[in-house]
Image (spheres, helix red, strand yellow):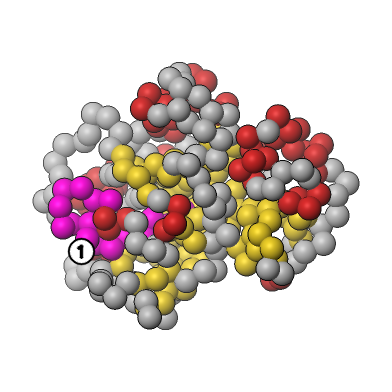
Amino acid sequence: MKLLSFSHKGRESWGAQIGESIIDLGKETPYPTLQAFIASPDYARREEIIKGKAATIAPGEISYLPVIPKPEKIILLVRNYLDHHQEVVAAGLQRELSKFPPIFMRYWQSQIGHNAPIIRPKASVELDWEGEMAVIIGKGGRHIPESEAMSHIAGYACYNDASIREFQFHAKQIAAGKNFVGTGPFGPYMVTPEEVPDPNNLKLEVRLNGKVMQSSNTSMLIFKIPTLIHYCSTIWNLEPGDVIVTGTPGGVGWSRKPPVFMKHGDVCEVEIEKLGILRNPITDET
């Protein structure tokens, strides 16, 4: 099942994409947001809840919002693909694998939806792509054992952790370069777990203006999804709708010789097997 958040005729809502049409579940259920539905007991009955409801909206009629527009927490991983770790080592910035998942936070205000423009800020000419798989938490909890972690997942989605490299490298704390307005594409929808039997074996590809820049597989993750959920739940109470963005593979722009960065007029696509294509044009800040 594909679930998404969107704006339609000036009203924010959420729904399910069935084939080429969308059911407006903000109208058809008592839940005002997808996050509220995920947190409800009805989420386990989602097939039954949706059955018989009419899909009356075409994707071309909506503006996509981030899958979860306002998560309480957006937790992202650094250097969590073996091929990306190797290119970081080659650049002389890191030598040893981390013993624990290296994480940082992104704020929901930086997120955008599918088709919305990624904004290259006035302060930067080094806007980079990072295609990633996002894990959306369904059942919350604290100290979740790895053996139970997968049962806490509501779904998976594409994410582009677009990065302002100058600000990322201003200091050892990288979050400044990861939280600019309009730099966190998330979508176009989330896919529920029954449609993704093995999230640890999905092809991931990023294309810039049609040219493949990143091509890898989630099997390259250093810290796997159960480990990430367990580790994060050791620090926080995970809540329904929280998002864990699992890291990017090799092939980012700053590691290339010469470096390649996104600019006004470009189009960046993140495609993950079974999870769809997240597409965003690039525009300069005005």
Quarter placement of the C terminus: bottom left
The foreground one among 33 and 60 is 33
Count of labels in the image: 1
Is residue 286 visible in the rendered image? The answer is: yes
Going by the picture, which residue comes out furthest to the left? 92
Q: Is residue 267 above or below residue 269?
A: below
Q: Based on the displayed image, in which of its 4 quarters is residue 20 positioned?
A: bottom right
The foreground one among 150 and 74 is 74
Q: What residue appears at the point 26 percent right and 55 percent down from the top-left corner?
A: 176
Q: What residue appears at the point 81 percent right and 57 percent down from the top-left corner?
A: 55
Is disc 1 placed on a helix, strand or loop? helix
Q: Which residue is mark 1?
A: 166
Q: What residue appears at the point 55 percent right and 44 percent down from the top-left corner?
A: 156
Which three-letter amino acid code belongs to the residue tagged 1?
Glu
The foreground one among 193 and 36 is 36
Q: Position of residue 32 (x, y in %)?
A: 69, 48
Q: Position of residue 135 (x, y in %)?
A: 50, 41
Does the magenta run of residues contain 168? yes
Quarter placement of the N terminus: top right
**Magenta span covers which residues?**
159-175
Going by the picture, which residue comes out furthest to the right? 52
Does the magenta run of residues contain 211? no
Left or right position of 34 against 172: right
Is residue 207 visible in the rendered image? The answer is: no
Q: Position of residue 112 (x, y in %)?
A: 49, 61
Left or right position of 154 against 258: right
Q: What residue appears at the point 64 percent right and 41 percent down from the top-left corner?
A: 36
Q: Residues within 10 Å of mark 1 (few under 14, many from 20)?
A: some
Left or right position of 12 against 276: right
Q: Position of residue 260 (x, y in %)?
A: 27, 70
